[in-house]
Amino acid sequence: MTASFTDLIDYLTLTGWRRESSGQSGSVWRREGWSKPLPVLDDLSSEDYEWASTVERSAVAVDASPREIHEAIGRMYFDVQEFRAADDIYIKGSIPVEAGFTLFSSARAMIRAAAATARSNKARIGGNYGPAALRIAEKARFGHTIDGSYIVPLLMPLDRPQEPTSDTPLEFEGELLNGASADQTQCRAPMRSGCVVARCSRSRGGGGGGTRRIRRCRG
């Protein structure tokens, strides 16, 4: 995802940085427990060299890699579910067509089921998602596959707070999923398709916020 200057400022605010001073061309930020200042030029673009420098400095402060910070900024207002092909079918950067079909169809079924059960508890959906749930599911997008393994990130947009602070919780857009709903619907359809669910958490103070869920899928 392409991050904006607003995303960068929100990320700094939400992860414990505070604006110490502002000038004609930028501002200086500081973080508790870190002695070095972080200069941030106004209206930076993610394509600018200064953007990379700013990300690198903020990464050092939280003992993370610049790539992790850049990804966290770009995905800050998304809930991310990562679908991964099983290791034994991933060969030389590719997977079988049948496995790819399972991967993407599982993601589609999961997001539809989660959206439907977030609106009303159902013991069984049976394909009856409802128009409101389908409208929610239509907001989800796939990101690029992740280098080194066949992982496809599914990105669901979150509401952007009007005035973010370090204590601001990130909420799903509209009537989307919450943690309980996602757990309740670890998705019958993907499980039938051979997906195994694993979770790995990451704190918002470091490389990013929320929970990344990885589903490993076979063809």
Image (tube, rainbow, N blue to C red):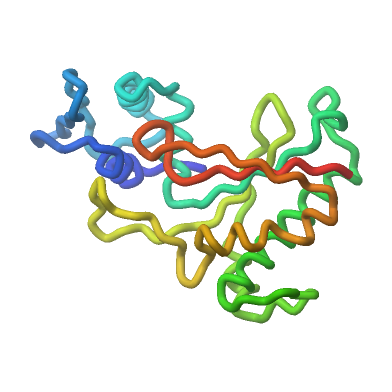
Query: As rendered, which of 216 and 144 lies closer to the eye?
Result: 216
Relative to 40, is 70 on the left or the right? right
Query: As rendered, which of 130 and 180 lies closer to the eye?
Result: 180
* Relative vertical location of residue 87 with respect to residue 121 in this rendering, above or below: above
> How many discs mark residues in the rendered view?
0
- Residue 2 in the image, given as x and y percentages of width and height: 47, 42
* Relative vertical location of residue 15 with respect to residue 167 in this rendering, above or below: above
Relative to 147, is 26 on the left or the right? left
Query: As rendered, which of 84 and 200 lies closer to the eye?
Result: 200
Which quadrant of the figure has residue 147? top right
* Residue appearing at x 83%, y 23% in the figure: 92
* Relative vertical location of residue 143 with respect to residue 70 in this rendering, above or below: below
Note whether residue 23 is visible. Answer: no
* Residue appearing at x 90%, y 38% in the figure: 96
- Residue 108 in the image, given as x and y percentages of width and height: 72, 59
Note whether residue 171 is visible. Answer: yes
* Residue appearing at x 41%, y 37% in the figure: 203
Which quadrant of the figure has residue 34? top left
- Residue 219 in the image, given as x and y percentages of width and height: 89, 44
Which quadrant of the figure has residue 118? bottom right
- Residue 157 in the image, given as x and y percentages of width and height: 49, 57
* Residue appearing at x 48%, y 35% in the figure: 71
